[in-house]
Each structure stands twice: as structure tokens, then as C-alpha cells.
Amino acid sequence: MTQRNSAAIKQPPTLRLHLWLETSDGLFFGIGRAQLLAKVDEYGSLKKAADELGMSYRAAWGKIKKTETVVGAKLIARCGNRRDGYELTEFGRTLLEGFNTWYHEMEHLALEKARKLFPWPIESFDEATCHAPPPASKE
């Protein structure tokens, strides 16, 4: 397909991928858990990370614990006393960085292929969010 016909589509389609790792027990690591670990790393708090992602502390804790059980290693550890929060373990950081690298490489390959196969200009999620209008004010 060399001819591009974007007349039927008002805005370019956005490529989105859903990649995750699972066992027979189900999903144990995907973009949601990667975002959760990144927010724990940013805030030093599982509670703040959960709030930022719109989930309960209990749900966040359950996701972390399920992954830790499946992989047999801790993802997060307490910093000092109870009030000091959490930090990523070396394994948690390695898992997060590995997943992010894998995800971005797969997204790049998928975007190249989509741009060759489809008759429209395809945008990456990052490109599409750059063009998106800012969120409406909540005032």
C-alpha cells in the first residue's frame, strides 16, 4: 500500500499496545504495575502512588504482593521506619527498567510496521498526547 488515503479518518489513528507477562496464575506484570513501581520510586510512598493512579492502597498492595509471589523476590522495601515509606529493591528496579525497555522497543517496531501496512498516518501514543488539547479546567 503506497497510496495514503486519510480522507475517511479525521485524525490520525494512535498505536496502543497491551503487553504483559503472565503465568498460569494470570497476569503478574504489565504497564499498570510498571506505572505503580515508577510512582513508588517517584514518591517513596505506596499510598501516594496508588492515589496518583486512582486505585486503593489495598489494590496496589495486592498487585505488588502477587508479582512478588510469582517472581519469588521483593519489588519494594521499607525505608527506615514505617513513616519513611518505600523504595524499589534492586530487583524491582531491574524489572521496571527491563519492562520499560521491552515495551518501548516493541512499540517502536509495531509503529514502523503499522506505518508500512495501513493507508493512514499512524501516530505513537507519545505523538498523539503532544497534539491533544490540555485537560479542561475543574474550576
Image (cartoon, rainbow, N blue to C red):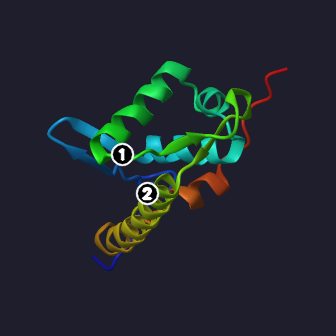
Question: 55 above or below 21?
Answer: above
Q: Which residue is situated farthest in the left direction here?
A: 24
Q: Secondary structure at mark 1?
A: strand
Residue marked by disc 2: 95
Q: Earlier in the sequence, mark 1 or mark 2?
A: 1
- Going by the image, does 1 lie left or right of 88? left
Residue 52 horizontal/vertical position (percent): 65, 32
Residue at the image point whose x is 58% and y is 29% from the top: 50
Residue at the image point whose x is 85% and y is 20% from the top: 139
Q: Secondary structure at mark 2?
A: helix
Residue 98 lies in what quarter of the image? bottom left
How far apart marks 1 and 2 lie (CA) works out to 9 Å
Dots 1, 2 in contact, CB < 8 A: yes
Q: Quadrant of the N terminus?
A: bottom left
Q: Which mark is residue 29?
A: 1
Q: Nearer the viewer, residue 7 or 56?
A: 56
Q: Nearer the viewer, residue 102 or 81?
A: 81
Residue 138 lies in what quarter of the image? top right
